[in-house]
Image (cartoon, rainbow, N blue to C red):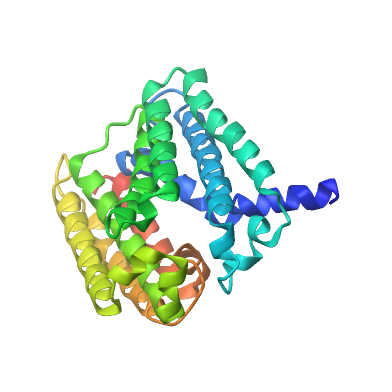
């Protein structure tokens, strides 16, 4: 194997398409309309790098542990470890380096809370990979916690204190996406889903669909409560931003109802209607923050 092919295999295993999830470290500064501290943007970027390293470590370990099962999956069999393009021993060695780097970043900038969130993400993710991904419902909560820990890591690095409402919105949004992941997996693979993920035997499409709708509805309701309860009075722009958010949730529900093997993260950023709703939401939300009314 040439060095170039090896590097490409490593890069593919770290899931570049999943890297945008690490931008969640900017959620707390964005919601608070403040960088939090001097050079806060730089600290947020370091938090994103820390979680980028942590997630890379998790993917490397997960693909090594799941190599045999992935070889029987219509899409995952092309992953570098499963296909033999990246030896499992190499993947594990790189995972150790990446995990060490994730925690070291927090230590280097003197932020124990960033170290704690990165370490918490690593521990929960490794437990998930080794055992807990086979425990129904718990496995979905662990996947959702990965999104929330990124948010908390960004808040810790920038010294921005998130509100309870903000954390509830983030938590419900993470659960909404996670349930949708399981629904699309079950819808696309059918009975074969159990072979690839044993916990799927405990799920049904109607129940997952109902849970997805419930999580999305609660997220929207909580978002409105957050906007209406903003310090200094309600901002009309932020309340109005709930409209494109609701449209995005509906569009997401339509897309995830189709048979597809595409990851839901790609659905969020790969559909023009979704992108239009997301852009409209972000525009209205930021206008409400910075226009002050």
Q: Position of residue 201 (x, y in %)?
A: 32, 71
Q: Position of residue 284 (x, y in %)?
A: 33, 58
Q: Is residue 203 above or below residue 34?
A: below
Residue at the spot x=31%, y=74% of the render? 250
Q: Position of residue 169 (x, y in %)?
A: 25, 52
* Residue 192 visible, this angle: yes
- Quarter of the figure with residue 92: top right
Residue 100 relative to residue 249: left or right: right
Residue at the spot x=64%, y=44% of the render? 91
- Quarter of the figure with residue 190: bottom left
Q: Position of residue 217 (x, y in %)?
A: 20, 66
Residue at the spot x=43%, y=73% of the render? 193
- Quarter of the figure with residue 163: top left
Residue 52 relative to residue 229: left or right: right
Q: Which of the pair 287/249 is nearer the observer?
A: 249
* Residue 26 visible, this angle: no
Q: Is residue 285 above or below residue 242?
A: above
Q: Is residue 89 above or below residue 243?
A: above
Furthest-right residue in this view = 2
Residue at the spot x=75%, y=47% of the render? 7
Number of marks in the image? 0
Q: Which of the pair 243/20 is nearer the observer?
A: 20
């Amino acid at each position: 194997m040439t060095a170039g092919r090896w590097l490409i295999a490593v890069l593919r295993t770290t899931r570049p398409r999943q890297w945008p999830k690490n931008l969640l470290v900017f959620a707390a500064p964005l919601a608070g309309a403040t960088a939090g501290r001097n050079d806060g943007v730089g600290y947020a970027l370091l938090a994103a790098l820390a979680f980028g390293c942590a997630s890379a470590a998790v993917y490397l370990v997960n693909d090594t542990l799941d190599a045999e099962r992935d070889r029987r999956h219509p899409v995952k069999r092309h992953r570098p470890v499963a296909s033999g393009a990246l030896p499992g021993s190499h993947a594990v060695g790189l995972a150790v380096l990446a995990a060490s780097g994730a925690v070291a970043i927090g230590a280097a900038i003197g932020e124990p809370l960033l170290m704690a969130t990165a370490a918490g993400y690593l521990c929960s993710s490794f437990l998930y990979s080794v055992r807990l991904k086979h425990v129904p419902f718990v496995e979905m909560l662990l996947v959702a916690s990965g999104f929330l820990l990124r948010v908390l890591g960004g808040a810790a690095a920038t010294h921005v204190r998130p509100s309870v409402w903000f954390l509830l919105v983030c938590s419900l949004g993470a659960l909404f996406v996670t349930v949708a992941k399981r629904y699309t997996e079950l819808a696309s693979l059918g009975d074969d889903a159990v072979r690839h993920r044993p916990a799927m035997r405990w799920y049904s499409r109607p129940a997952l669909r109902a849970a997805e709708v419930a999580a999305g509805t609660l997220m929207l309701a909580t978002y409105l409560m957050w906007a209406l309860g903003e310090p200094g009075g309600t901002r009309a722009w932020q309340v109005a931003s709930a409209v494109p958010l609701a449209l995005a949730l509906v569009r997401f529900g339509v897309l995830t109802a189709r048979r597809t093997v595409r990851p839901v993260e790609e659905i969020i950023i790969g559909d023009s209607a979704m992108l239009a709703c997301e852009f409209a939401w972000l525009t209205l939300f930021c206008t409400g923050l910075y226009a002050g009314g």
